[in-house]
Image (cartoon, helix red, strand yellow):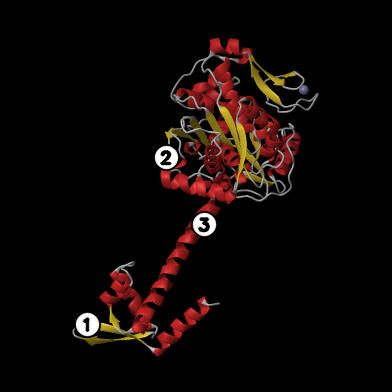
Amino acid sequence: MKNNGDVLKLQCLKCGREYPLFPPRHKCAKCGGLLEYVYDYSELRDKLFFEGPLSQWRYRSVFPPINENRVVSLGEGGTPLQHSKRLAEKIGLENLFFKDETRNPTYSFRDRCASVMVSNALDLSYFSVLCASNGNLGASIAAYSSKAGLECHVVVPAEVDEGKLAQMMIYEVDLIRGGWTIEEAIKKAAQVESETGWYQATADLNPLVIEAQKVISYEIYEQGISPDFLVVPVGSGGTIYSVWKGFNELKEMGLIDSVPKMVCVQPEACSPVVAAYNKKPVKVENRVKPRTVVLAVLVSNPVYGEKALLAVEKSGGSAISVSDYEVLKAQRELAVFEGLFVEPASASTIAAVKKLVIQGVINKKEKVVCLLTGSGLKAPHILEELSRRKRLEGFETETGAKEEILKILREEPSYGYLIWKKMGKRITLQAVYQHLNQLGRKGFLTSYSMNGRKYFRITTKGRKALKALEGLKGI
Ligand SMILES: [Zn+2]
C-alpha cells in the first residue's frame, strides 16, 4: 500500500520536539506548543497522487497514514464550487464562488474531520470516541461513530444550536454537559479523556482535523480556480489555518504559484482574532460572555487564534468583523439570489465580502471564494423566526382586510365585487366573500337584496368594533 508515513512527523512547532504519529495529540509535553503534522514536501511531491472521484479520500496521500480497509466514509468532501451570478452582480464582483460544504453527509464541513478521525480511531482499535462540540462537529462525529459501530460521547456546553443538538441525539450519543461555553466543554473533554482513555476527537485537541480540512484547498485547486481571496468564518481559528496550510502545500509542491489572501471573518460580538489583527500585537484576547446569532464561531479564547492570524498576515489577507444584522441580511440574500440556505457563520463570509468590496480591498475582477461551512437547516431559531413572521403576516392581512371591509361599508352599503374593487383587488374575490360571511356571523354586518345583487350594510355592533379597533391603534 502507498504510504506516506516516512515523509512526515508529528512535531511541536515551538520547540521542534517530535512525537509518535498516533494517537494524535495536540500539545507539546515539554513546552506546551501546538503539535502539527509536518511533511517533507520535496519527498511528498514524489509520492503525491490523487486517486478516485472528487472526495475527501482522493487526497489520502497527503494524510497521515490510515489503513485503507478501516476508512469510515459517508461520502464526505467533493463538494461543489458554485459560481455566483446574481449575488455577485449585486455586490459588484465578476468572479465570486461558493465552496458549498453544506452538501456533506451531515450538512457541514466537519464531516471531513469526522471521517478521518473516526477512521483513525477504528484503525487504532478504540471502542469509544469523545469530542467537545457546540454543534457541527458533534453531529458529524455522532454520525460517523454510528457508521463505524463505535460508542460516541459528546461534551456539549449550554450554548449550543438546538438543531445540531437534535442532530446528535438522533444518533443516540452519550451527551455530557460541559459548562456554559465551548472553551469549558473542551476542558471537560480533555479531563474525560484522561479519566477514560477514549479517542479524543475534539477539533482543537486533535491535529488530524487540520489535515482533514486542508484538502478543501486541494479540491478548489482541482476544480480549476486559483482564488485571489479565500473568505473563512473563524471561531477557534483551526479552519482558516487548515485551508491556508493546504494552499501552502500545493505551492511547496509546485502545483500553484501563489497562495490566496486569507480573509478571517468573525461576528462583532466575538471577534478576538480581528481585534488582534487590528492592533497588531500577536496575542489573542479574551472576552466575556458575548451574544450573537453566529453561534458556530462563538469562541472567546481561540486555540488556533495565533495560527489564524499567521495565515491572514503571511498571505497578505485581512480580518474583519460583521454585525448580526449584516449576517442575517447576507443569509437571506444567499437564499434569495443563489438558492443556498446556509447557517449564519457561513453567511458572515458574504457580509464580509460586501464590506471589503466597498472598502476597495477586493476589486471587481478578483476571484473570491467564500467557504460555506454548514446548512441553515441546522439553526432552527432561524426557521422559527421565518415561520413566526409568516404567521404574523397572515394575521395582519386577515384583520387588516376585515377592518378595511368595515370601513368601506361605513361609507355606504356595497356588494362583494365592488368591495373587492375598492380594496384594490389585493386579495381574491373569494377571500372577500369569506371575510363578509365571517363578519356577518359575528353580527358586524347584515345583508339585503337589491337589483338582483346582495348588498352588505354595517351594523351598530360593527361600527363599535371598528371604532374600538381604531382606538387601539391610536394608543
Ligand atoms: Zn514543544
Residue 61's disc number = none
Q: Position of residue 292 (x, y in %)?
A: 63, 50
Residue 453's disc number = 1
Q: Mark 3 highlights which residue?
A: 384
The amino acid type found where label 1 is placed reads Arg
Q: Going 23% across and 86% down the picture, which residue do you hit?
A: 449
Spatial CA span between label 3 and label 2: 30 Å
Spatial CA span between label 1 and label 2: 54 Å
Q: Mark 2 highlights which residue?
A: 89
Q: Position of residue 356 (x, y in %)?
A: 55, 38
| Residue 66 in view (yes/no) | no
Which of disc 2 and disc 1 is earlier in sequence? 2
Q: Going 64% across and 32% down the picture, which residue do you hit?
A: 238
The amino acid type found where label 2 is placed reads Glu
Can you tell which of label 1 and label 3 is closer to the viewer? 1
Task: Return the residue nearer the eye: 124 or 298.
Answer: 298
The amino acid type found where label 3 is placed reads Glu
Q: Position of residue 469 (x, y in %)?
A: 48, 79
Q: Secondary structure at mark 1?
A: strand
Q: Residue 141 sits in which quadrant?
A: top right
Q: Position of residue 294 (x, y in %)?
A: 60, 46
Which of disc 3 and disc 1 is earlier in sequence? 3
Q: Is residue 382 above or below residue 31?
A: below
Q: Is residue 303 above or below residue 254?
A: below
Which of disc 2 and disc 3 is earlier in sequence? 2
